[in-house]
Image (cartoon, rainbow, N blue to C red):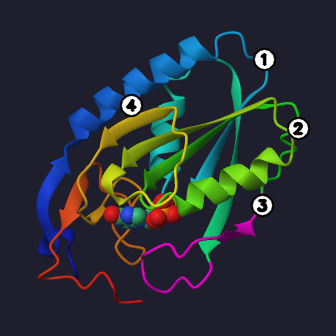
Amino acid sequence: MIHYEQYLKEKLIPEDALQKRIAELGAEISRDYADSTNLLLICILRGGVMFLTDLMRHITVPHAIDFMAVSSYGAGNRESQGAVYIKMDLMTDIGGRDVLIVEDIVDSGYTLSSVLQLLSTRKPASINICTLLDKEERRKVEVPIKYTGFVIPNKFVFGYGLDLDELFRNLPFIGVVDLDKYDVQKP
Ligand code: IMP
Ligand code: MG
């Protein structure tokens, strides 16, 4: 059986640091949206799931959740190519809602800038982004991020929602992939 430790170079963000920061983000969001009556958290599948479920426990403002899945055109390696298309759309009409997008990681920025553009056409009352991780130095297009958990270096990471070929999303920490032992370009 394969074990994540084979591919783990280092633990980048341990569980307690993640949970502490997520509690802070939840408190900040709760303050900012204290007057909102129709907050909707939108989780980008699948990487954002762990973050969403932990984050929402710290959001004291009543809110709904919904999910969408997107994919890059020309996906096959792990680098975004530009525009994205919707693989699974929301079930909620976001018109007039206060929307907060919850994402695992912003890398080039292509994914979130497309999602933001697309959802804006549906006329939400407001739309903001909350990302757990930000690989700032990799940005190709600007994305207005309102809430950031951690700015991280340009390393391929996994765990806590992020996968290695669909595995290991369940790990409670963020780890760096050992590229000598795992080929991340493999489709
Ligand atoms: P962007 O469109 O380049 O900003 O890419 C964002 C998406 O790329 C994320 O939602 C992730 O699915 C994926 N991604 C980027 N970096 C990593 C990483 O280090 N580990 C796992 N997935 C990543
Ligand atoms: Mg993602």
Labels 2, 3: front one:
2
Q: Earlier in the sequence, mark 2 or mark 1?
A: 1
Extreme residue toward the bottom, this view? 186
First to last magenta residue range? 73-89
Q: Quadrant of ligand 1?
A: bottom left
Residue 129 percent across, percent down from the top left? 57, 39
Residue 46 visible in the displayed image: no
Q: Is the C-beta separation of discs 3 and 1 under 8 Å?
A: no
Q: Which mark is residue 22?
A: 4
Q: CA distance from mark 2 to mark 1?
A: 14 Å
The mark that comes first in sequence, 4 or 1, is 4
Query: Residue 58: horizontal and vertical position, in percent?
Result: 48, 23
Secondary structure under badge 4? Answer: helix
| Residue placed under numbered mark 1 in the picture | 37
Whole-percent x, y for residue 40 in the image: 72, 34
Q: CA distance from mark 4 to mark 2?
A: 28 Å
- The residue shown at (34%, 73%) is 164
